[in-house]
């Protein structure tokens, strides 16, 4: 099974590296360094990988508010 379909697995994968690697592979294959120029089908693959990464970081049923996340990160001490 490709990483982009792992979100549909009965259990959450615990290894982050395959999903980061797959996103890099998709970008390299399409010769781009960001998501904007990707076709709709390639974006879906990236989104599948991103879902797993976000679920690993925040929990599978999290609702992520990027505005709140920015404020939390902006005030965080990242030198720890």
Image (cartoon, rainbow, N blue to C red):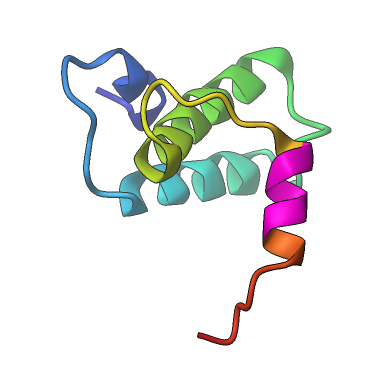
Q: Horizontal and vertical percent for residue 16?
A: 33, 50
3 vs 77: above or below = above
Direction from residue 42 to residue 60 in the image, left or right: left
Magenta stretch encompasses residue 53: no
Task: Write down the region rendered in magenta.
Answer: 67-72
Q: For residue 35, which quarter of the picture?
A: top right
Q: How many numbered discs, if any?
A: 0
At a point 51% along the width and 46% down the height, the residue shown is 25
Direction from residue 2 to residue 73 in the image, left or right: right
Residue 5 seen in this snapshot: yes
Figure quadrant of the N terminus: top left
Which SS does the magenta portion mostly show?
helix
Residue with the most extreme left position: 10
Q: For residue 68, which quarter of the picture?
A: top right
Q: Horizontal and vertical percent for residue 79?
A: 58, 87
At a point 37% along the width and 33% down the height, the residue shown is 59
Direction from residue 48 to residue 27 in the image, left or right: right
Q: Nearer the viewer, residue 38 or 17?
A: 17
76 vs 4: above or below = below
Q: Horizontal and vertical percent for residue 55?
A: 40, 33
Q: Nearer the viewer, residue 1 or 77?
A: 77
Residue 33 seen in this snapshot: no
Magenta stretch encompasses residue 69: yes
Residue with the most extreme bottom position: 79
Q: Nearer the viewer, residue 78 or 28?
A: 78
Direction from residue 35 to residue 12 in the image, left or right: left
At a point 63% along the width and 78% down the height, the residue shown is 77
30 vs 78: above or below = above
At a point 47% along the width and 37% down the height, the residue shown is 54
């Amino acid at each position: 099974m490709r990483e982009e379909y792992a979100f549909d697995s009965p259990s959450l994968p615990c290894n982050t590296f395959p999903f980061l690697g797959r996103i890099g592979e998709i970008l390299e294959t399409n010769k781009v360094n960001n998501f904007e120029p990707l076709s709709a089908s390639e974006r879906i693959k990236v989104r599948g990988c991103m879902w797993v990464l976000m679920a690993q970081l925040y929990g599978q049923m999290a609702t992520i508010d990027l505005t709140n996340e920015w404020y939390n990160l902006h005030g965080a001490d990242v030198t720890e």
